Image (tube, grey):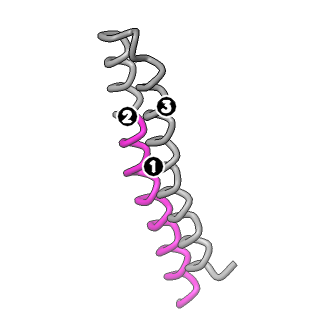
Amino acid sequence: MEKGLAYLAAGLAIGLGAFGPGIGIGLLVAKSQEAMARQPEAGGMIRTAMFIGLAFAEAVALYALVIAFILSGK
């Protein structure tokens, strides 16, 4: 029974932990594309800031994956 709950917790951790960054990355890219369409001359700076934001958002999903592995005991 305990192992089953650990697997359930691991599944919830990665599922919910990937949901937030997925939404965030989608919004980040959409707004960056919108900003570059409005001001093409600022595209380089916007793109740089977008990639930094993508890295931070992806790090949250990786943390959730690590927590899921810890919960599952592997």
Q: Is residue 4 left or right of residue 21?
A: right
Rendering coords of residue 49 (x, y %):
43, 34
**Figure check: 72 above or below 32:** below
Instruction: Give the image quarter of residue 23.
Output: top left
Nearest to the observer: residue 5 or residue 17? 17
**Figure check: 61 above or below 46:** below
Callout 3, which amino acid? Answer: Thr
Using the numbered discs, state the Cα–Cα distance from disc 1 to disc 3 in whole angstroms: 14 Å
N-term mark: 1 or 2: 2
Tell me whether the residue at label 1 lies in contact with that at label 2, contact meaning CB atoms closer than 8 angstroms: yes
**Figure check: 11 above or below 39:** below
**Quick one: SS at disc 3?**
helix
Identified at 51% across, 36% down, the residue is 51
Residue extent of the magenta highlight? 2-26
N-term mark: 2 or 3: 2
Q: Residue furthest bottom?
A: 2
Rendering coords of residue 33 (x, y %):
39, 19
**Quick one: SS at disc 1?**
helix
Callout 1, which amino acid? Answer: Ala
Name the residue tied to disc 2.
28
* Mark 2 surroundings: few (<14), some (14-19) or many (≥20) residues within 10 A: some
Name the residue tied to disc 1.
57
Q: Specify the principal SS of the magenta part.
A: helix
N-term mark: 1 or 3: 3
Rendering coords of residue 59 (x, y %):
52, 55
Using the numbered discs, state the Cα–Cα distance from disc 2 to disc 3 in whole angstroms: 12 Å
Name the residue tied to disc 3.
48
**Quick one: SS at disc 2?**
helix
